[in-house]
């Protein structure tokens, strides 16, 4: 009986084993490229370009810095990489994750650990930092919902919580070609790595 293939060839030439990912098979260019082509909201957003997970990740890191300006650079990097596993597993909506069950979470955890180790972060980040990143993620979701996904402000408040107007006033969703988003993600990653 033939063994089922559980690896993916990356554009960098790396072969990423999804069941046993190693940090040596992780390249930021592969992450940035993949995330720039993964649409959030299942592509159901306004505009001429999909709102990508890469663009979302850049915004979450910016929001994290605004909310927690005294947190070390490494946690800003963790915020930028918070959805990095989606470069190979996609951005699944919560009901699909629930239908797949615990196997999805285990896969996500394995990939996250390999990515974190590759870029000098602990395999598991502290729960307090994870909670702070989740808060920034919810602010981003609120902005996305109201600006490009067709939600009213009242709906966004109900699903994602009421936002501090001072925090979100000047934040705008960017819709741009994947190559621009990929380059912006890679550039921000390089800035954070240089500052560590």
Image (cartoon, rainbow, N blue to C red):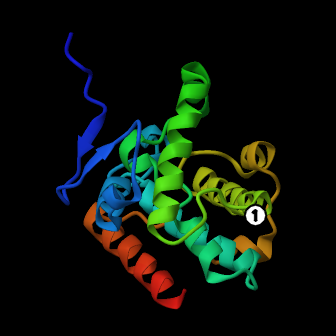
Q: Residue furthest bottom?
A: 195
Query: Few, some or many C-alpha atoms within 10 Å of disc 1 (few <14, some 14-19, many ≥20)?
Result: some
Q: Residue at x 44, y 50 (%)?
A: 46
Q: Which residue is mark 1?
A: 132
Residue 15, x across and y down, in percent: 24, 48
Quadrant in the rendering for residue 94: top right
In front of the other: 14 or 83: 14
Q: Residue at x 61, y 26 (%)?
A: 102
Quarter of the figure that contains the C terminus: bottom right
Residue 19, x across and y down, in percent: 41, 36
- Relative to 103, does residue 44 appear above or below in the rendering? below
Residue 63, x across and y down, in percent: 66, 72
Is 168 displayed left or right of 41 in the figure? right
Is 40 displayed left or right of 72 in the figure? left
Q: Residue furthest top?
A: 1
- Relative to 149, does residue 170 appear above or below in the rendering? below
């Amino acid at each position: 009986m033939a063994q089922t293939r559980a690896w993916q060839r990356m554009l960098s030439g790396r072969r990423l084993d999804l069941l046993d990912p190693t940090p040596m098979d992780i390249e930021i260019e592969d992450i940035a490229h993949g995330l720039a082509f993964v649409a959030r909201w299942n592509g159901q957003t306004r505009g001429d370009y999909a709102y990508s997970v890469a663009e979302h990740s850049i915004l979450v890191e910016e929001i994290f810095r605004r909310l927690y300006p005294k947190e070390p650079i490494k946690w800003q990097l963790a915020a930028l990489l918070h959805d990095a596993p989606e470069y190979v597993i996609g951005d699944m909506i919560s009901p699909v994750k629930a239908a797949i069950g615990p196997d999805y979470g285990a896969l996500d955890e394995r990939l996250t650990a390999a990515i974190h180790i590759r870029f000098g972060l602990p395999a598991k980040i502290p729960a307090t930092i994870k909670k702070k990143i989740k808060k920034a993620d919810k602010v981003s979701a609120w902005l996305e919902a109201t600006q490009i996904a067709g939600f009213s402000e009242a709906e966004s408040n109900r699903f994602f919580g009421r936002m501090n107007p001072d925090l979100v006033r000047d934040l705008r969703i960017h819709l741009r070609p994947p190559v621009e988003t990929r380059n912006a993600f890679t550039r921000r990653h390089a800035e954070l790595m240089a500052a560590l």
